[in-house]
Image (cartoon, rainbow, N blue to C red):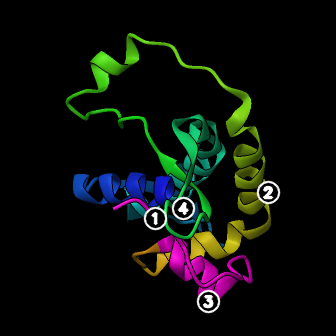
Amino acid sequence: MDEVEHDITKARKKKTKVGSFRINPDGTQERRKVPLAQSEAFLIDLLDKVCERMNDYQLDEDPVTKEKFFRRYAPRKGDKIYKEYKRFYFYSDAYRPLKFACETIIEEYEDEIFSLIAQEAHHLADKLCSEKSDLCGTPANHTEP
Protein backbone atom coordinates (compact mmCIF):
# COMPACT_ATOMS: atom_id res chain seq x y z
CA MET A 1 0.00 0.00 0.00
CA ASP A 2 2.98 2.30 0.50
CA GLU A 3 3.76 1.93 -3.21
CA VAL A 4 0.16 2.72 -4.17
CA GLU A 5 0.09 5.74 -1.86
CA HIS A 6 3.40 7.00 -3.30
CA ASP A 7 2.04 6.89 -6.86
CA ILE A 8 -1.28 8.46 -5.84
CA THR A 9 0.55 11.31 -4.09
CA LYS A 10 2.65 11.94 -7.22
CA ALA A 11 -0.49 11.94 -9.38
CA ARG A 12 -2.27 14.36 -7.00
CA LYS A 13 0.63 16.81 -7.24
CA LYS A 14 0.29 16.88 -11.03
CA LYS A 15 -3.30 18.08 -10.67
CA THR A 16 -3.97 16.67 -14.12
CA LYS A 17 -7.58 16.03 -14.96
CA VAL A 18 -8.64 13.40 -17.42
CA GLY A 19 -11.94 13.26 -19.18
CA SER A 20 -14.26 10.55 -20.22
CA PHE A 21 -17.27 10.64 -22.48
CA ARG A 22 -20.51 9.20 -21.34
CA ILE A 23 -23.58 8.72 -23.44
CA ASN A 24 -26.76 9.43 -21.54
CA PRO A 25 -29.91 7.36 -22.08
CA ASP A 26 -31.34 10.24 -24.16
CA GLY A 27 -28.36 10.00 -26.56
CA THR A 28 -26.57 13.16 -25.46
CA GLN A 29 -22.87 13.06 -24.64
CA GLU A 30 -21.49 14.19 -21.32
CA ARG A 31 -17.82 14.91 -20.73
CA ARG A 32 -16.73 14.42 -17.17
CA LYS A 33 -13.32 15.43 -15.79
CA VAL A 34 -11.78 13.73 -12.78
CA PRO A 35 -8.37 14.13 -11.16
CA LEU A 36 -5.80 11.71 -12.58
CA ALA A 37 -5.29 10.12 -9.14
CA GLN A 38 -8.97 9.14 -9.10
CA SER A 39 -9.41 8.09 -12.71
CA GLU A 40 -10.39 4.48 -13.16
CA ALA A 41 -7.85 3.89 -15.96
CA PHE A 42 -4.98 5.27 -13.86
CA LEU A 43 -5.95 3.22 -10.80
CA ILE A 44 -6.42 -0.03 -12.73
CA ASP A 45 -3.01 0.43 -14.38
CA LEU A 46 -1.42 1.25 -11.02
CA LEU A 47 -2.87 -1.80 -9.27
CA ASP A 48 -1.90 -4.04 -12.20
CA LYS A 49 1.75 -3.00 -11.96
CA VAL A 50 2.37 -2.25 -8.28
CA CYS A 51 3.23 -5.81 -7.24
CA GLU A 52 6.09 -5.91 -9.74
CA ARG A 53 7.94 -3.49 -7.44
CA MET A 54 8.08 -5.92 -4.54
CA ASN A 55 11.64 -6.83 -5.55
CA ASP A 56 12.60 -3.37 -4.20
CA TYR A 57 11.98 -4.69 -0.69
CA GLN A 58 14.00 -6.94 1.55
CA LEU A 59 13.16 -8.88 4.67
CA ASP A 60 14.50 -7.12 7.73
CA GLU A 61 14.44 -7.82 11.45
CA ASP A 62 13.89 -5.46 14.34
CA PRO A 63 17.04 -5.78 16.49
CA VAL A 64 15.10 -5.46 19.73
CA THR A 65 11.88 -7.42 19.16
CA LYS A 66 13.29 -9.76 16.49
CA GLU A 67 10.07 -9.19 14.55
CA LYS A 68 10.53 -9.62 10.80
CA PHE A 69 9.15 -7.13 8.30
CA PHE A 70 9.75 -5.99 4.74
CA ARG A 71 11.57 -2.68 4.18
CA ARG A 72 12.07 -0.82 0.92
CA TYR A 73 15.76 -0.65 0.11
CA ALA A 74 15.75 0.51 -3.51
CA PRO A 75 15.50 4.18 -4.41
CA ARG A 76 12.42 5.30 -6.29
CA LYS A 77 12.54 6.64 -9.82
CA GLY A 78 13.31 10.32 -9.53
CA ASP A 79 15.45 9.96 -6.39
CA LYS A 80 18.95 11.42 -6.81
CA ILE A 81 20.67 8.06 -6.44
CA TYR A 82 18.27 6.22 -8.79
CA LYS A 83 20.47 6.49 -11.91
CA GLU A 84 23.49 5.14 -10.03
CA TYR A 85 21.43 2.36 -8.50
CA LYS A 86 20.01 1.22 -11.86
CA ARG A 87 23.53 0.48 -13.15
CA PHE A 88 23.64 -2.49 -10.78
CA TYR A 89 21.49 -5.55 -11.14
CA PHE A 90 20.17 -7.30 -8.06
CA TYR A 91 18.18 -10.49 -8.19
CA SER A 92 16.79 -12.59 -5.43
CA ASP A 93 13.80 -14.88 -5.08
CA ALA A 94 13.25 -13.58 -1.55
CA TYR A 95 10.62 -11.10 -2.75
CA ARG A 96 8.39 -13.75 -4.37
CA PRO A 97 6.25 -14.40 -1.24
CA LEU A 98 5.79 -10.64 -0.85
CA LYS A 99 4.78 -10.30 -4.51
CA PHE A 100 2.30 -13.16 -4.12
CA ALA A 101 0.83 -11.56 -0.98
CA CYS A 102 0.59 -8.21 -2.80
CA GLU A 103 -1.25 -9.77 -5.74
CA THR A 104 -3.63 -11.59 -3.39
CA ILE A 105 -4.44 -8.42 -1.43
CA ILE A 106 -4.96 -6.35 -4.59
CA GLU A 107 -7.26 -9.00 -6.06
CA GLU A 108 -9.30 -9.49 -2.89
CA TYR A 109 -9.56 -5.85 -1.78
CA GLU A 110 -9.55 -3.93 -5.06
CA ASP A 111 -12.95 -2.30 -4.44
CA GLU A 112 -11.97 -1.27 -0.92
CA ILE A 113 -8.70 0.24 -2.19
CA PHE A 114 -10.61 2.20 -4.88
CA SER A 115 -13.00 3.42 -2.20
CA LEU A 116 -10.19 4.68 0.04
CA ILE A 117 -8.55 6.46 -2.89
CA ALA A 118 -11.87 8.04 -3.91
CA GLN A 119 -12.19 9.38 -0.34
CA GLU A 120 -8.68 10.84 -0.78
CA ALA A 121 -7.65 8.91 2.32
CA HIS A 122 -4.08 9.08 3.51
CA HIS A 123 -2.20 6.26 5.25
CA LEU A 124 -3.82 3.74 2.93
CA ALA A 125 -2.12 0.75 4.55
CA ASP A 126 -3.44 1.63 8.01
CA LYS A 127 -6.93 2.38 6.72
CA LEU A 128 -7.08 -0.83 4.69
CA CYS A 129 -5.95 -2.79 7.74
CA SER A 130 -8.18 -1.14 10.31
CA GLU A 131 -11.30 -0.16 8.38
CA LYS A 132 -11.64 -2.35 5.32
CA SER A 133 -10.10 -5.73 6.16
CA ASP A 134 -8.81 -7.98 8.90
CA LEU A 135 -5.34 -8.25 7.37
CA CYS A 136 -3.40 -6.78 10.28
CA GLY A 137 -3.84 -8.92 13.32
CA THR A 138 -0.59 -7.86 14.99
CA PRO A 139 -0.33 -4.57 16.86
CA ALA A 140 3.13 -3.68 15.54
CA ASN A 141 2.99 -2.59 11.93
CA HIS A 142 6.36 -1.46 10.65
CA THR A 143 6.57 1.10 7.93
CA GLU A 144 9.58 2.85 6.65
CA PRO A 145 10.05 6.37 8.03
Label 1–label 4 contact, CB within 8 A: no
Residue extending farthest to the left is: 80
**Residue under the image location 46 percent in, 46 percent down:** 72
- The earlier-in-sequence mark between 1 and 4 is 4
Give x and y (percent) for residue 6: 39, 55
Q: For the magenta stretch, what is the residue range?
A: 124-145
Query: Could you give the CA–CA distance between mark 2 and mark 1, rounded to whole angstroms?
Result: 20 Å
Quadrant holding the N terminus: bottom right
**Residue beneath label 2, please?**
104
Looking at the picture, tell me which residue is in the foreground, 11 or 76: 76
Q: How many marks?
A: 4
Residues packed near mark 2 inside 10 Å, few (<14), some (14 to 19) or many (20 plus): few
Give x and y (percent) for residue 4: 50, 56
- The earlier-in-sequence mark between 3 and 4 is 4
**Residue beneath label 3, please?**
131
**Residue beneath label 1, please?**
143
- Answer above or below: position of 79 versus 45: above
Residue 18 in view of the camera: yes
Looking at the picture, tell me which residue is in the foreground, 40 or 73: 73
Tell me the SS state at disc 2: helix
Tell me the SS state at disc 1: loop
Three-letter amino acid code at disc 3? Glu
Query: Could you give the CA–CA distance between mark 4 and mark 2, rounded to whole angstroms?
Result: 13 Å
